[in-house]
Amino acid sequence: MEKRRLDFVDSAEVDLPDFSADWKLPEARASNAEIEARFYYEFARESETISRLTKTLCNFTRGEILTGRLRSLSSPGEGLFILHPRCEGFALTLVPTIDLREIGWNKLQPDERRSLIDGFSGVPAFRPLPDQMLIDFAPEIIDPSKPQSDLWPRWCGSSRLFYGGIEQAAFLIDWSRGPQAVKAGIKKWFVLRKRELGRLKSGGKLPKDGFYFRLKEETGAKNPKKKYRTALRELGAMRLLGTYHLIDAIRITKNALEGTALFSEHHKSAWNVGVRAARQTFQELFYPQDEFSLRMRRHYGLPEIEEPISYRRFCLRTGKNK
């Protein structure tokens, strides 16, 4: 049977390993990380070059590799990385027992499989650029270890936090993992980053005690479309009541909105709440009252506070004090 199976193979290639027994698919309950790790491992076994490089790598300890003693053009670790970064990753995980020719995925020890799976589940396809790579990527960036002027962005880890709630960051995106893995990595980063900024804010540990970087509080309207639509509705009320009496504002909006007023036609308070909300949105947007924002506006000769034009018209029409 063995001879019949090899009849079609050139005699010079009879010594090639036979992987035909390792054809089975992962179990249905296998995690995404397990399937991905198995994919890279089994495909790497098909490469004689990778097999040879990993065998050479076993002549060194993991400590020697990680401390950079193999940093040369002939380094087997570098060769694996050039072929694919994942190859070096799983090779370092299994050193010094790695044997791609003889050991398929199902023959790995449980702890070895677990280590490989953890490696794939613990390294998202989308993640912040490590500090050592960040220096090569953008050598002109401000050294986070140096004192910085209050008027420049502040560092928070490997990203920069700017006045007004703007964050700049560099990311490593491994497109070889596929778009779904990248998308999952983005989602994971967002959740963790949002939680971290919230933790820093609650502890008063944001740069400049929170005056430099404004992290807006969560509101009930978490859907951006709903939030902005609500704000525009409130702005509409403020603008209408800056020119018209309430009864006229109701009539105008009912005619334009097919019988439905902008706010309840039976509750004047709803319109007034909308006016106050629009005023608040305007001031939070352009004139936050924290210490640093005030200092920034003074520095550039800007007013410390301003009322919306339509609100000023509303006050003039109604005789309301600001």
Image (spheres, rainbow, N blue to C red):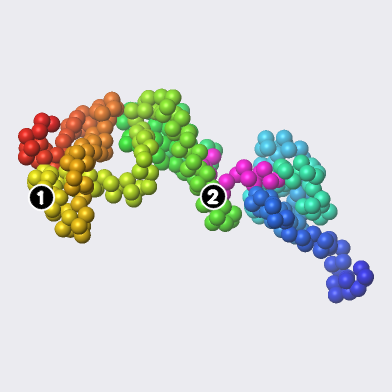
Q: Does residue 80 appear anywhere in the picture?
A: no
Instruction: Using the rendered view, name the quadrant where residue 16 is placed.
Output: bottom right
Residue shown at 55%/55% (left/top)?
A: 180
**What residue is pinned by disc 2?**
184
Q: Nearer the viewer, residue 82 or 314?
A: 314
Q: Nearer the viewer, residue 95 or 77?
A: 95
Magenta run includes residue 125: yes
Q: Where is residue 322 in the image (x, y as percent from the top left)?
A: 13, 31
Seen in the picture, residue 4 relative to 218 is either above or below; the reply is below
Seen in the picture, residue 153 relative to 55 is either above or below; the reply is above
Residue shown at 17%/58% (left/top)?
A: 256
Q: Where is residue 113 in the image (x, y as percent from the top left)?
A: 74, 46
**What residue is pinned by disc 1?**
248
Q: Element at badge 2? A: helix
Q: Where is residue 199 in the image (x, y as percent from the top left)?
A: 46, 30
160 lies left or right of 47: left
The label nearer to you, 1 versus 2, is 1
